[in-house]
Image (tube, rainbow, N blue to C red):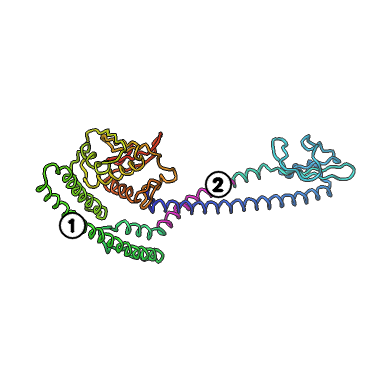
């Protein structure tokens, strides 16, 4: 998931302001255009009507009017005018965009008694040229307004979001391992309220984290004591009992050693800067040893497909991840099922031939305290994923095409 910076928000704000500015300029320009067209048309019609009334009353000759006013052309049937063919079919009243002699005219036709018809034509060529010029001027004005608006909106957005960028920088400066660090309150009143709320929230979080760390430390101390007692008792029994008792005692010693490593791995989750110590792990040998306590006495068939793999990693962390996944697979496969463990250079894969995971549950399998139909505590996969993420690995869980599920631990953090 990508992080959106204040610069991205600034661009969005600038685009919004420019869009509003251009829209306002466009609406205003269109309003002026409509108003200008209405005024021009109304004025022209009024002038032409007055002009026609004057010409009809004075009975002016067509040639006289055509010679004195090039923008007007006047025809009257009773005065012997030759009516152009483009005008003969026109009814009385106004007619727009009538083409005559490669020009466009506004035509007023008046029906007089005795089948006398009067035609007054106004040449719109010049006015149309002016309209095109106005349109170009309007488009240029919108472009200029957009450029000026963009520049002004950038300056406004930069000034408006400057306190937010400062607050983001303060949040990024916070160190989770440095308790007591607080956001410095700026001069902006609204953002100061946010900073104060975040500071109060951090105080509560620090108290919660400190309580959890204290609990983890106390639990570690309390658990190490009985583990030490068990280890000492096993050593004492090993010295006193015959050699035939050695295998069970060695299993006890391995379990105690692994329990100590598991404690170290779990405690590492609460310490961001202190990862558990890593060592070279021969995985093709360790995986069967780690699985032994969970597969002993079960009828589920285990198929091992292990390639040689040496991995530098904390033993406790990898053990917890692997055994949690293995336990889930054994539980899903059932007593008569089959579990396949595959190891290669990139991953550990654990497959089962059980019923698979319901589609509705699949997105939630790594959530804490989520229990599927197979039961469990609801915490194992959550801890396994947290440990995998901590060490840069990637843990995935999906249904197989045939049946069952497949869990894969990718060592490089990327899936194939």
Disc 1 and disc 2 in contact, CB within 8 angstroms: no
Residue 38 in the image: state x and y as whole percent: 68, 51
Mark pair 1, 2: CA separation: 84 Å
Looking at the image, how many numbered discs can be counted on the residues?
2
Secondary structure state at the residue bearing disc 1: helix
Q: Residue 20 lies in magenta, yes or no?
A: no
Side of 337 where 149 appears, left or right: right
Q: Residue at x 11, y 44 (%)?
A: 242
Q: Which residue is mark 1?
A: 225
- Of 189 and 199, the residue lying toward us: 199
Label placed on residue 216: none
Mark 2, Cα crowd under 10 Å, few <14 / some 14-19 / many 20+, is some
Q: Which residue is mark 2?
A: 139
Side of 66 where 232 appears, left or right: left
Secondary structure state at the residue bearing disc 2: helix
- Of 122 and 188, the residue lying toward us: 188
* Residue numbers of the magenta segment: 135-158
Residue 406 in the image: state x and y as whole percent: 35, 38
Q: Residue 142 lies in magenta, yes or no?
A: yes
Q: Residue at x 35, y 40 (%)?
A: 334
Q: Residue at x 18, y 53 (%)?
A: 227
- Kindly indicate the quadrant of the structure image that contains residue 246: top left
């Amino acid at each position: 998931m990508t992080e959106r910076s204040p610069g991205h928000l600034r661009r969005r704000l600038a685009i919004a302001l420019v869009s509003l500015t251009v829209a306002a300029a466009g609406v205003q320009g269109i309003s002026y255009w409509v108003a200008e067209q209405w005024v021009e048309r109304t004025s022209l019609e009024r002038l032409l009507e007055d002009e026609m009334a004057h010409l009809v009353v004075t009975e002016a000759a067509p040639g006289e009017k055509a010679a004195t006013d090039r923008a007007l052309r006047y025809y009257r049937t009773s005065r012997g005018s030759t009516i152009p063919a483009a005008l003969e079919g026109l009814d009385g009243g106004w007619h727009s965009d009538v083409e005559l002699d490669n020009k466009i005219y506004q035509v007023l036709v008046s029906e007089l008694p005795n089948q006398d018809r009067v035609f007054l034509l106004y040449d719109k060529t010049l006015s149309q040229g002016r309209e095109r010029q106005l349109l170009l001027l309007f488009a240029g004005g919108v472009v200029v307004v957009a450029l000026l608006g963009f520049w002004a909106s950038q300056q406004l957005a930069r000034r408006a979001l400057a306190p937010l960028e400062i607050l983001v920088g303060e949040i990024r400066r916070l160190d989770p391992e440095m308790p007591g660090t607080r956001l410095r309150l700026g001069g902006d009143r609204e953002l100061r309220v946010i900073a104060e709320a975040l500071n109060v929230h951090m105080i509560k979080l620090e108290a919660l984290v400190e309580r959890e760390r204290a609990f983890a430390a106390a639990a570690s101390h309390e658990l190490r004591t009985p583990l030490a007692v068990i280890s000492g008792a096993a050593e004492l029994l090993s010295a006193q009992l015959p050699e035939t008792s050695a295998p069970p005692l060695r299993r006890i010693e391995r379990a105690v050693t692994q329990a100590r490593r598991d404690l170290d791995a779990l405690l590492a989750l609460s310490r961001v800067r202190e990862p558990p110590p890593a060592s070279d792990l021969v995985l093709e040998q360790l995986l069967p040893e780690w699985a032994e306590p969970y597969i002993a006495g079960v009828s589920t068939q285990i198929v091992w497909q292990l390639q040689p793999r040496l991995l530098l990693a904390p033993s406790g962390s990898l053990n917890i991840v692997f055994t949690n996944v293995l336990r889930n697979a054994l539980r899903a496969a059932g007593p008569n099922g089959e579990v396949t463990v595959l190891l290669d250079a990139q991953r550990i894969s654990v497959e089962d031939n059980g019923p698979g995971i319901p589609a509705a549950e699949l997105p939630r399998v790594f959530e804490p305290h989520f229990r599927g139909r197979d039961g469990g505590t609801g915490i194992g996969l959550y801890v396994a994923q947290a440990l995998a993420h901590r060490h840069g690995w990637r843990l995935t869980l999906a249904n197989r095409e045939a049946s069952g599920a497949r869990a894969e631990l990718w060592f490089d953090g990327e899936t194939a």
